[in-house]
Image: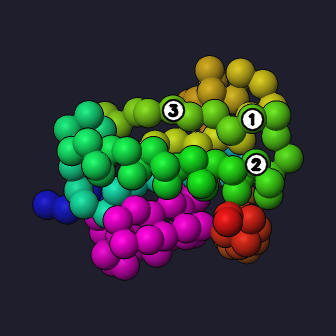
Amino acid sequence: MASIFTRIVNGEIPAYKVAEDDNFLAFLDVFPTAKGHTLVVPKKEVDYLFDLDDEMYAGLQMFAKKVALGIQKAIPCVKVGVMVLGLEVPHAHIHLVPMQSEKDLLHFSEKVKFPPEEMEAIAKLIADSIE
């Protein structure tokens, strides 16, 4: 059965997309820990990040870097933190979290909620900031 991220990649589930190319997709986390919290995934479903082949792994990291720089331009923050989790969704992914302090990653289970119109505005703001 396809992961929820594969279903998003395939357009079966809506997402607040911020960037996309032939191999990768970035979209807002619907259970964010901070405004602008973004997930970056390869379009090819692979469960574990370190099971990606070298080219796909390097490409994912470079795509995430481009998205992180866009987040930093769009969302006021000190830095964009990077976290790799993945036990809940069997699809390799990277979390990019705008940080004001280390607490924003250390307290990762604390979620915030934004209304859909704000999520759309955040996604557009980030998308427009990616070069």
Q: Quadrant of residue 105?
A: top right
Residue 36 on the magenta span: no
Q: With respect to residue 4, does 65 lie above or below? A: above
- The first of marks 3 and 2 along the sequence is 2
Question: What residue does disc 2 label?
Answer: 72
The mark found on residue 24 in the picture is: none
* CB under 8 Å between discs 1 and 2: yes
Mark 1 vs mark 2, CA separation in Å: 7 Å
Residue type (three-letter) at the residue carrying disc 1: Lys
Residue found at x 71% / y 21%? 102
- Helix, strand or loop at disc 1? strand
Quadrant position of residue 129: bottom right
**Are circles 3 and 2 on residues that touch, CB within 8 Å?**
no
- Residue 87 in view (yes/no): yes
Task: Give above or below for 129 relative to 62.
Answer: below
Q: Quadrant of residue 9?
A: bottom left
- Which amino acid does the dot numbered 2 rest on? Gln
**Above or below 5: residue 49:** above
Q: On the image, numbered disc 1 is attached to which residue?
A: 79
Q: Quadrant of the N terminus?
A: bottom left
| Near-viewer residue (61 or 126) | 61
Extent of the magenta region:
6-32
Q: Position of residue 60 (x, y in %)?
A: 41, 50
Residue at coordinates 49% horizontally, 49% vertically from top-left? 62
Give the amino acid type for the residue marked by disc 3 in the picture. Met
Q: Relative to residue 12, is residue 74 drawn left or right?
A: right
Left/right of residue 83 with respect to residue 99 in the rendered view: left
Few, some or many residues within 10 Å of mark 3 (<14, 14–19, 20+) = some
In this rendering, the label closer to the viewer, 3 or 2 = 2
Residue under the point 69% across and 50% down: 69
